[in-house]
């Protein structure tokens, strides 16, 4: 994964999962920051961990930040 490739984490679904896109490809559904770290590692940043995910400007959080994992956490639409 190139360092300029954006990671987009979409708003929580009803089941609490959040779709994750890296570059132009959806890579899966995350149920926590650990899942996003795993997706980013698979994309080429093996040294990343959960704290890198939380702190990185490379990740665009839609519908709530890294603490938001349910539609109830996201607040009103």
Image: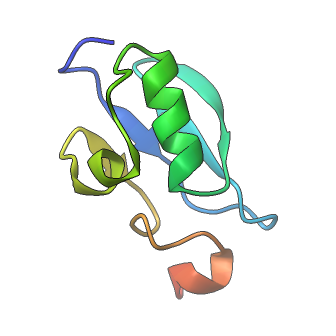
Res. 4 in view: yes
User: Which quadrant of the rendered structure holds the N terminus?
Assistant: top left
Image position, residue 28 (x, y; %)? 67, 32
Residue at the extreme right:
15
Residue found at x 34% / y 47% = 53
Question: Count the marks: how many?
Answer: 0
Image position, residue 67 (x, y; %)? 46, 73
Residue found at x 18% / y 21% = 4
As drawn, 21 above or below 18: above
Horizontal arrangement in the rendering, residue 17 relative to residue 40 (left or right): right
Image position, residue 21 (x, y; %)? 50, 31
**Front residue of 49 and 28:** 49
As drawn, 55 above or below 68: above
As drawn, 55 above or below 3: below
Image position, residue 35 (x, y; %)? 59, 44
As drawn, 46 above or below 30: above
Residue found at x 22% / y 47% = 56
Res. 77 in view: no
Residue found at x 24% / y 12% = 2
**Front residue of 53 and 21:** 53
In terms of image quadrants, where is residue 17? bottom right
Coloured how?
rainbow
């Amino acid at each position: 994964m190139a360092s300029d490739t954006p990671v987009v984490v979409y708003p929580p679904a009803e089941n609490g999962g959040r779709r994750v896109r890296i570059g132009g490809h959806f890579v899966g559904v995350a149920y926590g920051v650990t899942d996003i770290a795993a997706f980013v590692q698979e994309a080429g940043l093996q040294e990343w961990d959960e704290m890198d995910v939380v702190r990185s400007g490379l990740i665009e959080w839609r519908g709530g930040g890294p603490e938001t994992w349910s539609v109830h956490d996201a607040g009103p639409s």
